[in-house]
Image (cartoon, coloured by chain):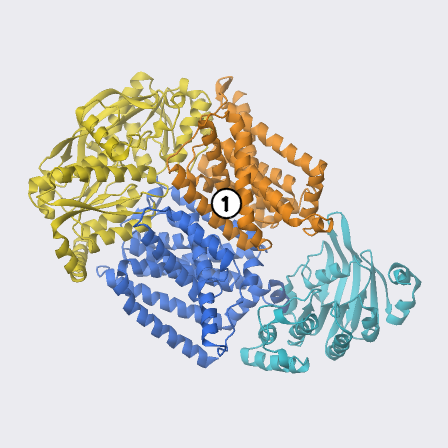
Chain colours: A cyan, B yellow, C blue, D orange
Amino acid sequence: MAETVLETSGLTMRFGGVVASDNVNFKLKHRELRCLIGPNGAGKSTFFKCVTGLLTPSDGHVFMRGQDVTGWMPHQVASLGVGIKTQTPNVMDALSVHENIWLAARRFFDPAEARARTGDVIDRLSLGPIARTDLGQLAHGERQRVELGLVIVTDPWLVLLDEPAAGMSAEDVDRMTEIIHDITRSASVVIVEHDMQFIRSIAETVTVFHQGRVLMEDHVDRVMTDETVRRVYLGKKA
Amino acid sequence: MSLKRREFLGAGAAALATASLLPRAALAADTIKLGSILDTSGIFDAYGKPMDQATRLAVADINAAGGLLGRQVEIIDYDTQSDMALYSQYAQKLTRQDRVDVVHGGILSASREAIRQTMRKTDTLYFYNVQYEGGVCDRNIFVTGVTPTQQVEVLVPYAMKKSGPKVYILAADYNYGQITARWIQKFVEENGGEVVATDFFPLDVSDFGSTITKIQQASPDLVVAPLVGGAHLSFFRQWAAAGMNTKIPLASTTMGVGNEHKVLTSAEGDGIMVAYNYSQELDTPENKAFKEKWKAAYGDTTGIHELAVSTYQGIMLWAEGVKKAGSLEHDAVVEALESGISIVGPAGNIAIDPQTHHAILDVHIMEVEDQKMKVVETLNQVAPVDTQAVCNLQENPDDNMQYEIEI
Amino acid sequence: MDRSAVRDVIVTLVVSAILIGVMPMLISTYTLTVLIIYGMLGLSLGLIWGFGGILCFGQAAFFGLGAYVYAISAVNVGESTLPMILAVLLTAGFAALLGAMMFYGRLTDVYLGVITLVVTLILFKFINSTAGPQYVIGKARMGGFNGIPGFQTLNVPGDPGAYIWGDAYYYVCAVALIIVYLLVTWLLRSSFGRIAIGIRENETRMALIGYDVAARKTVLFAAGAGIAGLAGALYASWAEIVTPTLFSLGQSAEIIIWCIVGGLGTRLGPIVGAAGLAYLKFLLGQQSMIDNTLIMGLVLVIFVLFLPRGLVPAIGALWQVSVGHKVRRRPARRMRRARNG
Amino acid sequence: MDISFVILVEMLYAIASLVLISAGLAVVFGMMKVINLAHGEFMMMGGYATITAVQLGVNVFIAMLIVAPLVVGVIGLIVERLVIRHLYGRLVDTMLATWGLSLVFIGLATMIFGNTTTGISTPIPGFAVGDYQINGYNFFIIVVAILLVVLMYAVLKGTRAGLIARGTMQRSDMAAALGYSPDRIYMATFFCGSALSGLAGAILAPLVGLVPTSGGAYIAKAFITVIAGGPSLIAGLVSSATSFGFVSQVFTFAISPVIGEVALLVAAVILLRLMPQGITSRFFKGKL
């Protein structure tokens, strides 16, 4: 049995009277790829923010590789070797692609090594032609890809992605799928996603959130056919 | 140590100045240069502007009377914009580039201290024509304004006689206020009274509501308020607004220096007791002539205040010294001024005290009445006993500091 | 990269050597000295604000603190070397504490502005109310509103009798500014500087990469404050008096105006802006036609509206246009976000 | 007994004057996310407008309550058209531009009125409470502040303009979606904010002397009060004015006015450290 790399127990987040995340117990195994789905306001993003340290949970605990990281600052979480990508592209707009990725690499490696790794990632993500362009001038899909580059340049063992495929073209999504499969060779991955097409193409186990709670957790095929899930989430489409 | 330093600096400064400015100095030898350094803009310009006007009037008078030593006097003036850093810069410019023969100016004590050493190092005679806290002891400087004892020793007994022995002091929280408050305390006690409390206020405090309540709790017979500047003026207004002005009498050593009594309505200001060297209401031929000249030059006389008159008298004293010395040479003029020289200015007879280089002058006790200062009593030729207690330039001509006067 | 660094240093040294030699022919060294000191003060805010994205309304507080620390310790020590060092270290230390308090509290933009403004006011009010005889540090009377005059000015280290003043002091200050400028250049070229710029651009992202944003901002803040402290100490030694107006909001405002006019996000801009505007103010004092405050205000409004990037970047852009597009370096267009972020 | 009543009045007065000082800034900040650093100078101009009007023979209450707000409101309108509207969405740039404007106004006022302190006397006499005299004008200020808060609440809650205003505060694109030009809303808001600043300056003018630099004494306090208040306009204003007024008066009576001012500032630092987004980001959430 593989080791558990990420675990939450009784994770609860309240905003005033609203419970955005309600007693969530969650476990992720080594090299597992997990998707979190649910309708808007189901609590996926709150859960994500609590895990990454962007929010401090009102109650409950977060463990990474057995270590209690509840209430840590985001930079402390990231320093454990966790790669994080937030919902909206979060990059340094006035800096070039190269500088962006270099800054991420520099956190864990000396300048020379950081430069080498930055070059590698730029090749791997086919960012070569735009390596010297400022992020502010890039298209949405490219920015998403660069941000993924920031995440993987340090070889994280746990990758947390919030809607990596949002607003991307079909071609971009394909490339993203490829990259994510690549990542899972060495790391565990959690993806918060809306795009069902995308989820079908990458996921095995899916966790469904509803009203702040975990509604069900199962293989993607079974989740897709589940009546309750269809009602709360997919039902709108049907 | 300080002597060694001065020699070092003096020699260097002279060398620098001569090297860079020889041609101009030779060229301008036909006029006598009077440097003026005042805040004629910025927050202190209410003090500085009339002083500047008085400077011009004095120099015009001197020139109209044929100048000094057969030469005309020329003013070189800079506006320090109420900025202390500019005092240092313009003082350097006056002494090293313009090479003036004398400097009149400086308003705040801080501005005086910012330029005093520069004047001393470059052997430029310096006149500080402002009422201040006293204690400056430096052979290069002459002070023609009143010091705390000159006002307080006259004002406090008078005010206590009119009111009673329990005194509450409200003072501006800076050097002048602190020292004046201590003199007030001393003279109150000497006159058999008691100071019930002393409160200090930084110059930017303008809300005195709680203070007025506190004063009422202490219920004194008299409030002495050496408060300074525009913000503190609101004390007198709030005091009147609370209806206190008819209950407890007020005395001040500062209200009116910048013509504050003309800003207050007569209902607010009437009855406040003050003591100064000058009042526009002084009924002397010199004052009448002065006011007429001022009116002819500037249209109306509302701007004239204590500091303007001090400036006028300071320049006249300097001119008298130059005449007596028959030269502009620094030490000759200082010696002439130390010979007990005096003039009769708009505020009466004013003489230089050789021991302190401060002024011996008349002090008038006045009461504010209908936005005017009505003279009640005049004390002739009051000496600056506070500074005399710590400073004797006849015995220690090399003295160079501002003493904190122990009381 | 290294070659360009060497070139940068050489250009800096040559240009400044020429300026040091030429300027005294145009302006008296006494005035030049204070322009240099203001330039250093401008640079200190330029570093914090332009490269760290930290808008500090209280840079004058560090300037004043440096000046007061120098004055107080010079009165007590009677020699200038230790006071100079103390002025830098204590000011930087104070800023580190303040910065840690703010940055670990996740305070940003406006809130940061309020705190720095309030701290400046507190210092001003405190120093302003120390006229009483009970406020003494060692041998130094605090003096309240009137300030502290008559302390030991800069001397040759180890020899309190050998004063450095006049022209010599001008050269000392000029060299100090060059050293500080080169240090800032080195800092910005180092990983630390590049990370600081990353933080300016996107704090959240830098935290998610794993950088301790608060710690780094604190260090940068302290470094900028240390430079301001040095400028304050040099100023004290120049003016031979320190007064509470050094802490005033007006002084803080001027520093901000210098940076805006000179150009934020450049090293040179704040220096040029500071020296230029301070000299303008000096010249304006010799006329009485128009109120000087009015002119300063108009300058600021006009720059914000029409030249928000400041003089130095604008001239740089003009230069590039006139020379052609051969220059490979990217133009200094990096500031927009930091200023409005 | 009398003394505690007197102290209570002083405390209410301190709170009321903070509300007055900050109201104009709060409206502009709450609605437009613009920090008007010329706010203090708007107050100063309100003071001068009042004094000039009184000297021209206008009744003092009309001068304070009508002339000053109108004059300053119009000046605000001009400023908004000429400068501010070019800078919407650029928080720091508007702060800098308004700072520049504040210097311009100080310069203009100096050239017109000079730096001599001017003022008018308070139009309401003092009266006695037991052994103590109280400044009657304090009550006027307290009443005006209360009326002002009530009026603001009524306008925001009860009128169509208030509805639009509330919408704009929540989402700045809301008004546009409802078919109102944001440009006109901002113009109107800035006019109201400026008028409030002018009113505050006018009402405080009889108490404190007026010089062109008087505004500087208010802007810091107003700035701190508004920012510490947080996102809710009225609740934020009242809650932070109350906390600061209370703290500063306690220390003023216990020790001295200077310590009172310092206590206010220290309270602001602590408050913002604990609640970085202001009081109403934690309490009174979602209130006006």
Q: Quadrant of the C terminus of chain B?
A: top left
Q: Quadrant of residue A48?
A: bottom right
Residue in view at x 32 percent, y 29 percent: B256
B407 relative to D282, above or below: above
Q: Quadrant of the N terminus of chain B?
A: bottom left
Residue A27, percent across and down?
79, 67
- Three-letter residue code for mark 1: Ala
Residue B365 or residue D185, whichever sits in front = D185
B311 w.r.t. C266: above or below:
above
Q: Is residue D81 at all visible to an observer of this figure?
A: yes
Q: Nearer the viewer, residue B39 or B236?
A: B39
| Residue C247 drawn at (x, y percent) | 41, 49
Residue C139 placement (x, y as % from top left): 30, 48
Q: How far across and down, in percent of the image, does residue C185 sit?
A: 44, 70
Q: Which residue is mark 1?
A: D38
> Along the line of sight, which residue is nearer the eye, C221 or D204?
D204
Side (left or right) of C250 relative to B332:
right
The residue under the point 51% across, 44% down is D266
The residue closer to the viewer here, D40 or C190, is: D40
Mark 1 Cα shell of 10 Å, populated few (<14), some (14-19), many (≥20) = many
Q: Give the number of callouts.
A: 1
Query: Where D270 sits versus C33, above or below?
Result: above
Residue C156 shows in this picture: no
Label 1: which secondary element: loop
- Asked whether, in this view, residue B291 is left or right of residue C15, the answer is left
Query: Which chain is mark 1 on?
Result: D
